Image: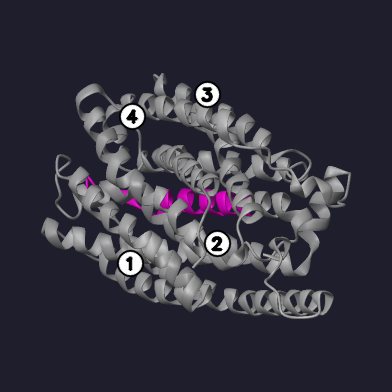
Amino acid sequence: MTTFSRYQKFVIAMLAFLQFTIVLDFMILSPLGAVLLRDLGITTSQFGLVVSVYAFSAGIAGLLTAGFADKFDRKRLLLFFYSGFVLGTFLCAVATSYHFLLAARIVTGLFGGVIGSISFAIITDLFHLEVRGRVMGVVQTAFAASQVMGIPLGLFLANHLGWHAPFFMIVGVSAAVGICIAVVLQPINQHLRVASEHNPLRHLVKTVSQRRYIQVFAATILLATGGFMLMPFGSAFTVHNLGISLASLPIVYMITGVVSIISGPLLGRLSDAVGKYAVFCGGSAVGMVMVGIYCNLGVTPIGWVIAINAVLFAAIMARMISVSALTSAVPDLKDRGAFMAISASLQQLSGGVASAIAGLIVVQSADGRLVHYNILGFVVMGAMAITVGMLYPIQRAVKLKLSAAASSSSVASGGPTSLPQTDG
């Protein structure tokens, strides 16, 4: 088994903490939904717009920066957008009205939405495909860590200090992470040595028009549907439909997150051992079953709610980790930044559309209950099934690409050799 150097371990930890702040900034809106609906006096469709506007601005920013993504040192690019993200989150913290918060989410999305693609490009640059599942498994635990540490603490602060407090918390943590990146992370510029299209627009068009990339982009559009459709109203559904009190909500998120933190690295190792597509299929199958159960629940004991959420989030983790590792093998070195930016952009845009549609489908009745939430579940289940089929030719193409690279390397060296980093 590959042993990581101290610097590689730092990079993994740094990217995990960075993802923690980004994910928490987005996810904190879901558990705050019940509070914001009350305190700001907004409707479900307005709240859906608060959530989706981040995704729309992030998607636009991703497309605008895709042509430039491979023209700069990835460390400098990361610091620039992370600084903007911290600024946007600070604006959320000082927002005093619905429209102020809406504008602040736009700013946050313009910068924060690009950071994930830069992070995945860094992972692809620095780690071989054989261990990329392990790396993704650790980094993606930020999704779960935000539930265990961030969301419960954010809810506690919101309940005692108001809904602005969680955003101030994120600003403080993000500033510390940013300083650590600036001081310790080394320049990442290997991709600058590879010949690429000098014109950013042509580079963008060339990347978008490649058939093997288009397959991934098409699958990415549907991959975002699940999280973006169910997540915005998750807390409101849990409180008003499942009968879980606001005071007990942090317990649900915390225990679910602990399970996800434990399962994340294990699923990453499993994807490296048995195959990334196989793990994705397994996660999708379990996820469809759990979504079908969860979205059709009525008042339910908290123990069952926690158990169902834990299994559902473990399935989501399996999908996220395996698909991130699998699709990272598709782009060539000279296209990685643009490919990751476009992929993230499409994910954000499609997720924004899904979130906005969810806000139109779900209706809050007079007693606070959410109506038509089960319809969202059926849509999500359908999207999960379709992506399983869409990713099959992609995983076959990755196998052929790696086999060709291995054969080429073997011929060049006169014998068997390991895959070169640039081919992963």
Q: Amino acid at mark 4?
A: Pro
Q: Which residue is mark 4?
A: 166
- Point out the tag, 2 or 4, that comes first from the N-terminus: 2
Residue 109: where, in percent of width, then height? 55, 36
Q: Secondary structure at mark 3?
A: helix
Q: Earlier in the sequence, mark 4 or mark 1?
A: 4
The residue labelled by disc 2 is: 132
- Report helix, strand or loop for mark 1: helix
Q: Earlier in the sequence, mark 2 or mark 1?
A: 2
288 versus 254 height, above or below? below
Disc 1: which residue: 291
Alpha carbons under labels 4 and 1: distance apart: 28 Å
Q: Which residue is mark 3?
A: 87
Looking at this view, is 236 or 318 the one in front?
A: 318
Q: Is residue 367 magenta?
A: yes
Spot the residue most to the left. Answer: 301
Point out the stretch of residues depicted in magenta: 343-368
- Kindly report which numbered mark, 4 or 1, lies closer to the viewer in this rendering: 4
Q: Amino acid at mark 1?
A: Val
Q: Secondary structure at mark 2?
A: helix
Query: How far apart, in angstroms, are the residues tagged by discs 2 and 1?
Result: 28 Å
